[in-house]
Image: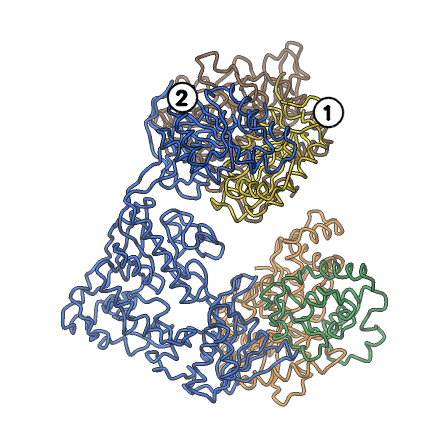
Chain colours: A green, B brown, C orange, D blue, E yellow
Amino acid sequence: MTKQEIEKKVELIKEISGCDPYKCMKCGKCSGSCPSFNEMDVKPHQFASYIINGDIESLVGSQSLWKCLTCLACIERCPRNVQPGKLIDAARQLVERERGGDHLLADDIPELIDDDVPQQLLVSAYRRYRR
Amino acid sequence: MQGLKDRLKELLTDGTVARVVGWKKGDMPYNPEPAVFTSVDEMDDFVYDGFCGANLSKMMIEATKLEGKTAVCLKPCDTYSFNQLIREHRVNRDNAYIVAVGCRGKLDIEKIKKDAKGITEISGTELDGADEITVKTIYGDKTVNYSDVLLNRCHVCKGKDHMISDEVWGESKDTADQERFAEIEKIEAMSPEERFEFFKKELSKCIRCNACRNVCPACSCRKCIFDNTKFDAQQKANVVSFEERMFHIIRAFHVAGRCTDCGECSRVCPEGIPLHLFNRKFIKDIDKFYGEFQAGKDPEAQCPLTDFTFEDIEPGERG
Amino acid sequence: MKYSYYPGCTLKNKAADLDLYARKCAEILGFELEEINEWQCCGGVYPLGSDEIATKLSSVRALNDAKEHGQDLVTLCSACHHVLKRVNDDMKNVSDISDRANNYLALDEPYRGETKVLHFLEVLRDVIGFDELAKKVTNPLTGKKIGAYYGCLVLRPGKILEFDDPENPKIMEDFIRALGAEPVVFPYRNECCGAYTSLKEGGISQERTKLIFDSSNGFGADMLITACPLCMYNLNKSEADSKIPVYYFTELLAEALGAKEGNS
Amino acid sequence: MQRIGVFVCHCGTNIAATVDVKKVVELVRFEPGVVFADDYMYMCSEAGQEKIGEAIKEHGLTGLVICSCSPRMHEKTFRACAEKAGLNPYMVEIANIREQCSWIHKDREEATEKAVILARAAIAKVNLNAPLQEGESPVTKRALVIGGGIAGIQTALDIADAGYQVDIVEREPSIGGRMSQFDKTFPTLDCASCILTPKMVEVNQHPNITLYTYSEVEGVSGYVGNFDVQIRKKARSVDMAACTGCGECQAKCPLGKSGKIPSEFDRGLRGRSAIYMPFAQAVPAVPVIDRENCTYFKTGKCGICAKICPSKAVNYEQEDEIVTVKYGAIVVATGFDIINLDKYGEYAYNESPDVITSIELERLMNASGPTGGHLERMSDHKQPKDIVFIQCVGSRCDDERGKPYCSKVCCMYTAKHAMLIKDHWPDTNITVFYIDVRTPGKNFDEFYRRAVEQYHVNYVKGQVGKVIPQPDGSLMVQAVDMLDNKQIMKKTDMVVLAAAIEPNKGVRKIATMLTASIDNNDFLTEAHAKLRPVESPTAGIFLSGMAQGPKDIPETVSQAGAAAVKVVGLLAKDKLKTNPCTAKCDPMFCNGCSTCANVCPYGAITYEDQLVRGPGVNETRRVAVVNNALCQGCGACTTSCPSGAMDLQGFSNRQITTEVDSICR
Amino acid sequence: MSMNEEKTEFRPLIVAFCCNWCSYAGADLAGSSRLSYPADVKIIRVPCSGRVNPMFILRAFERGADGVIICGCHPGDCHYSTGNYYARRRMTLLFSMLDYMGVENGRTRVEWCSAAEGVKFSNTMNEFCEKIKSLGKSVRLGDLRCKD
């Protein structure tokens, strides 16, 4: 990515999330709260620094995008109102809005469901994993 | 109107009030004038119709100093001024009896006169009158829609609710059908040169008659800095060119944050200078920069000019 | 009392119990749930981007429908509750979203968040009152030790949903008490069940649900209640040894009110 | 008409090199009012001053303009010089032709031209100057200290030792404050009561100190040097003179054993009786009856304490008493509390008795505390083998749950707690979850390092997300180790929360009464953050201790001493000189609208009904009155005054306008 | 007034109101640091930026000033704690009104300048002078009157 592209993406993440990564004081409460911490390669408390340092490439390439459960625990507890959950969601949006960024294809679904799957799960997963 | 008159007479008779501040018939069918009534007999001249635009709250500054209570007829928009006067300790609330009179908008005689010369009689302008008013002229009768000949200020009516009252008489109507700040925005959209020419043209008409100052409820200083201490007629003659040149802008700043936008200044200006354009600009700026504020709405609210927040915008910023 | 009612997709299918019992109980408790005409799916998740409008429109339509009927809007599903309340908050407080949504919808009168959205439990707490509810219970669930599993979507973000204290909620415990049973408070009641990731990777939800069952079971619960079909699914799929039965809260409500037999 | 003398200084070559001094003299000589003009090498020198003095006498000068350096440099000098020669010092104006002219301009003509303009402006101003007299106000030689914690105690002792009368008003039944609850103090680990109790006794016995315990400030009026303060002495229901402090009553109170009334002093960790002294070393050692809980006051039955009191000191009929006392100065030392933790559900403070705050831990470790100093879990009274400390609970928060500031003392007391526990019970495993360890201060970082190096306390960088009570009674702490990038699930026996500090709840009310300003966090504001840190912007009000901001004991004591010196400095004066450049209201113009009082930062403006007489006016009306002792001369009132009634002496509307005119001529 | 008739270059007349505690001291510091700015700037000392009545500014323009600048302590640093906050509101509204009346933007300015900011003071004055020079002689405010 060129410098301009990075800057553009940083701005986009800030805009989509509505959060200010500079407010982060690196307390780690998000990571201390995250139910999916062990699944993630980039940890919640690192989201803000990745954006501040412009390492968007690593962030959008990270598995964390697909591991966040959107349980909002970090959003509720963040003492600085940085809300890491919103930051990673914005990064996910960035990927999904690009062609081919989908994490779930319609064709995959029949294999994934069983008789009990509630509609809500399908809808949510589809919404989360693709544009 | 008869009901209102009777009620006011009753207040005088039963001793609730010692006098009534209202309007009495003028020498024309369309120019009632503010008046103080101290007896039931005098009350025969009392009138309340569509031409009673005058804001009587300012008269209460002196009236409430007198012995006994004074009843005053206030329209919804006048009550804002009255509240502001309470806030500034200018009127004695305990000495006032507020008859909150209904209002369906007030009439602009100049607009009526446009199509009707030689007026002899006008009817249907009462509060409970018809949607059409009849104008008798020496050239024959004409009818006009009440709502077509309202004062400009009534098109940006602040609402039909009285902010303060002891009793309410009659129904009110919110006559607002225009954006309050549309005029201001129009001027703001002009180039600086156009703006300057516009104001220069308007202000050049001023004859320094002081009507705007004298009618303004916010301009009620015991002693105006524009009056010098010279005796009698000389008083109004301005010795300092500074004051004269800057009169209107200084006056607008003087009432900024306190002006309720009652529009009396523009209504009474004999030269038709749209003086409210200054006051309303301040109101618009205050709303935009510091949050919406309506002077006289809440007598406890802090005036924006004697308040601040740490995050206020810097001078010159455009919000 | 009449409420506009937004059932949502799942309650019409996999979670039909949740819906059915709710309606029956409402009747007994003296209020009516009037289903909104031609409601559309809320989307299941709150649209994340501050720049997304289209995905919020279905919620706005439902909200506006309730407004036009002059009714509060009641919902049952945690996800619907979450999405509707958040979109409503946007319509009320975020002028940019509100303006754009209104521009698109071109309603007769713009919608600015006037509708009040209530979770069914909030109706029980704030309108009926748990004391009153307790009086209507004919078949108290005495002796049952019930854990309330809230999950995430019904509680957070606390400031917008204003459902209950997001870290230490009480509403479902009070509800259980009203039904004559004993609530079991356990710390995992507001922790995530694994959510939608169970579709692609069951691992996380297996791990999460085990923690939830271990904790609730450990504190002595013999059953759990939930308001969320997704939680229900994940909990049911759990292979934890400590697993205990899970019910929709409305089913227990129906049981306590004596409305269950006739239908089940 | 004034007779003005103008003196232009060369300042060696500082001015003369760029400004044609002689030309300035020539050009200003014919300005209106000027009767004399001269120049001199160094106007501020002895010889220069003599020259001025002579000219004043010789030419009968009524006003002076000195064209020289900045008034910030020598205005005082020249004013004194004028006074010496019999001229009112406020008839002197300075034209700054050095800093604002000769030093910044190179072109001699330009600089000379500007110097003349500046001189003319000053001359025009002096023409309108009026002699001003520094006012005087008497000083009541007695100080009030609000709050009887360590801050208030130290301030009172220092004032009293300097020979002045001082009263302490304390809301609680005993002085001592928070410090009396503590076990040990950092960084030296002295026992808190060992160093505090002697001071408390000293306060009680000091001939210059009067104690009002179980009392509150009810109202304040007046101004610096002359405050009138109403103090409500709440009914103790015990005669202070008769009581011997034997303690029989609280021992016999039937409610004492019930545990129904939580002890405030022990933070609710145990109960107390209805007639009680908060703690054994209480000063005064006189109990009070808590009327809300006392059976006698609730039902009219019981009355045991009155029956058994050997000195018949219990008096159920006692009533609140309000006394009014005059003071010259007031010190606010209202202290702090910790925030309410109800909103921090994730830390399970309300759910688990084994999650406690640091102050509760102080009580648990204190030999006089509920457990006799034995550290134990409140749930099962077992000694914890593993303890977790969580830092910054509510501090440094940007949301409404917490406070935006650092509470400053938590890092140090946590290290203290950890070491004390390790000292007593070395096999205890201690983990501290921190965001940053902040230990600036003498011997502070060494102290913290000792906890790590000597006591092997485990410090983990990362905040705790949730404390999860376990079915087996232990606590699971879910946190992160940000340095190892690992999530931690740590099983522990006890969790201690370093809850954020906040100013005492009552301070807002007190600040309002004193018109002392207060910041967004309810801490009192200093007159100047750097240069006047123990004074409130309101004259005569001083700040001591946590009421001003988070600080530890050493800092509190130094601030208390500093506040005391400021108070003594004030009380030492018989009269206060007041700045004569104060606002002045012209009652002829005043509308009595209250606008000026709204903007006055010093509460110097009041309103009274005054008889106003003038052309066409003879009536009694509401007008603004400026208290010259309080007014600092900022002029905010003058600009806010809608009617132009307020003016500022020394910087009047006419004076400034004439300066403008003169410059724009 | 001019003592040098040959100079044809436009020399603006600028009035600066400086509060006694911060900006006036800042100006002194600029002086003792020999940081030059045009002699066109004439400083009037006031106790506080909150003392500056809009009338003074209008008066200056009416009397022929080409620019007026008000300097005060930085927000939060006011010697009298709050004076500059009131000044900020007052000047914000006044400037907006002047702009509205078609008076050139830029003839008025507020700058917060501490006693330590000699450099800033001098830079500000240099900038402001340049700005006023580019605007030329002020006619509009002097002319904004009721009658000639």
Percent of width and height locating residue D332: 37, 56
Q: Amino acid at mark 2?
A: His
Q: Quadrant of residue B11?
A: top left
Kindly identify which numbered label has been placed on residue E8: 1
Up the image or down, D25 lies above or below D499; here it is above
Pick the residue in front: C77 or D566. D566
Percent of width and height locating residue B252: 56, 29
- Chain to which mark 2 belongs: D
Q: Amino acid at mark 1?
A: Thr
How many numbered discs, if any? 2
Q: CA distance from mark 2 to mark 1?
A: 42 Å
Callout 1: SS: loop
Q: Counting other residues with Cα less than 10 Å from the Cα at mark 1, is it few (<14), some (14-19), or many (20 or more)?
A: few
Residue D253 shown left or right of residue C206 in the figure: left
Q: Quadrant of residue E141?
A: top right
Kindly identify which numbered label has been placed on residue D59: 2
Q: Counting other residues with Cα less than 10 Å from the Cα at mark 2, is it few (<14), some (14-19), or many (20 or more)?
A: few
Percent of width and height locating residue E113: 58, 44
Percent of width and height locating residue B94: 37, 34
Up the image or down, D259 lies above or below A16; here it is below
Can the viewer see residue C206?
Answer: yes
Pick the residue in front: C159 or D387. D387
Q: Is disc 2 in the same subunit as disc 1?
A: no
Up the image or down, D590 lies above or below B270; here it is below
Residue D193 shown left or right of residue B33 in the figure: left
Can the viewer see residue D595?
Answer: no
> In this rendering, which labeled residue sits more in front, label 2 or label 1?
2
Kindly identify which numbered label has been placed on residue D645: none
Query: Do callouts 2 and 1 mark residues in contact (Cβ within 8 Å)?
Result: no
Quarter of the image for the C terminus of chain B: give it.
Answer: top right
